[in-house]
Amino acid sequence: MIVVTAPAAQPTSASQPPAFLTASGHHYRSAQLATKDQLRISADHLAGLAAECAIKAILLDYLGSRLNEKQRPFSPDLMIPQQRPVNGVKPKKQDRKEYSHEHLPELWGQLSTIASRRRGRETGPLFMQLIQQNPFHDWDVGGRYCDDTNISDADLTRHLQAARDLLAAHQQAITLGTGTLA
């Protein structure tokens, strides 16, 4: 008698934690290729996604952010403790977008806020200088639907450079092995 057993169930992609650092590198390399092929919309969109993924990797690996039950990153440092009702009136519930790590440019603001609170422990002066100005202040994830007249050479160059710098900061922290973003 032959017994056929089903292979062990493989975890679904939904149950595996996101690989933000790997995704960031992939998006950055794809953005470079799109730039060479003069695919400006794709290049700028991918540069932004590369930066988003690099920021999420930095937040998770070095600045205390966590994944929720749906494998989405958030920061406990940005959560406001629940308050008790006053005179029978329930306080307004905090919008999850205030502590969930989603898209640029808001994500850059979260990175800056969290890093400034941890200055000296997990972040060094070079990293703080890197994130001082938000190069994605005018970037929107919905930009993938625009025509390329909205994307200047300067914007694309700035976005690619910022994504590269974020990846380099994470890599340097790995190389140093100190758990600190230099």
Image (cartoon, rainbow, N blue to C red):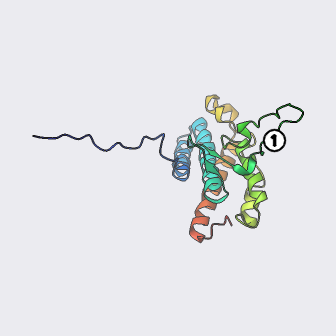
User: Which of the 4 quarters of the picture holds residue 44?
Assistant: top right
Residue 165 horizontal/vertical position (percent): 65, 57
- Quick one: SS at disc 1? loop
In this rendering, position of residue 83 left or right of residue 21: right
122 lies above or below 19: below
Tell me the residue at 85%/31% (across/down).
89
The residue singled out by tag 1 in the image is 83
Residue at 71% x, 43% y is 99
Give residue 173's quadrant in the image: bottom right
Viewed as shown, does residue 7 lie left or right of 156? left
Where is residue 180? Give x, y as percent.
Answer: 66, 66
Q: Is residue 76 left or right of residue 168?
A: right
Please name the residue shown 70% across and 33% down the image: 150
- Which residue is farthest left? 1
Q: How many marks?
A: 1
Residue 72: % across, % down: 59, 43
Q: Residue at x 53, y 52 (%)?
A: 25
Name which residue type carries label 1.
Gln
In screen coordinates, is 175 left or right of 4?
A: right
Closer to the camera, 171 or 5? 5
Residue 26 position within the rendered picture, expressed as x and y whole percent measured from the top left: 51, 48
Quadrant of image for the N terminus: top left
Which sits in the foreground, 64 or 148? 64
Question: Which residue is most to the right?
Answer: 87
